[in-house]
Image: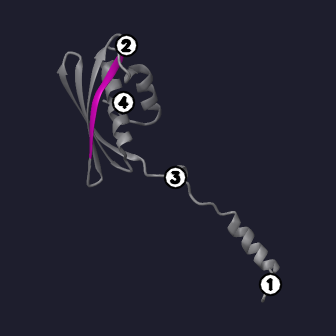
Amino acid sequence: MIRRVTYLTPLAFVLAGGVSGCEATSPDMVTRADPVYQGIETRLLDDDLVNFRVELAGGSTSSDVDRYAECAAAQYTLIRGYGFARHLRTKVAEEGGIWRGDAVYTISSARPDGLRTIDAEVVAADCAENGIPMV
């Protein structure tokens, strides 16, 4: 039986130490470009029913589209003198790096029933703090 013995020189230890400090990039560490907000279109469908169409580019995702529409809804709710909105639906599409959202919200002075309600003042303040444009 032949036994191979490998001797590590001091240089090998230095090189091994340098490589051992490297870590693979986790998904949390990957940074993406910030979304480029390209506009909001607002349509009043009824006294308390509002449609928001938003458009983004850059490093956008569908969650960026949802957030942009939510920010628009929050500010619009405050402009109309109400305090709350309830998300009904958002349709999201991406084509050629441009993301488009078509969202519908109800607005009201009292907190509406439902799971996806927003306090317009709180959401609008958060959007302003995070640099997300509003209507």
Q: Which residues are magenta?
A: 83-93
The residue carrying mark 2 is 111
Whichever of labels 3 and 1 marks the residue nearer the N terminus, that label is 1
Marks 4/2: CA distance? 17 Å
Q: Dividing the image into 4 quarters, which one contains the C terminus?
A: top left
Task: Characterize the local packing of mark 2: few (<14), some (14-19) or many (20 or more) Cα atoms within 10 angstroms.
Answer: some
Label number found at residue 5: 1
Residue 120 occupies which quadrant of the picture?
top left
Marks 3/1: CA distance? 40 Å
Estimate the x, y position of residue 10 in percent, counting from the top left. 82, 78
Marks 1/4: CA distance? 66 Å
Estimate the x, y position of residue 38 in percent, counting from the top left. 29, 43
Whichever of labels 1 and 4 marks the residue nearer the N terminus, that label is 1
Considering the numbered disc 2 on the image, is that residue within a helix, a strand or a loop? loop
Identified by mark 1, the residue type is Val
Estimate the x, y position of residue 133 in percent, counting from the top left. 36, 35
Residue drawn at the location 78% of the way across and 74% of the way down:
13
Whichever of labels 4 and 3 marks the residue nearer the N terminus, that label is 3
Whichever of labels 3 and 2 marks the residue nearer the N terminus, that label is 3
Identified by mark 2, the residue type is Arg
Identified by mark 4, the residue type is Cys
Label number found at residue 71: 4
The dominant secondary structure in magenta is: strand
Identified by mark 3, the residue type is Pro
- Quick one: 13 or 35, which is closer to the camera? 13
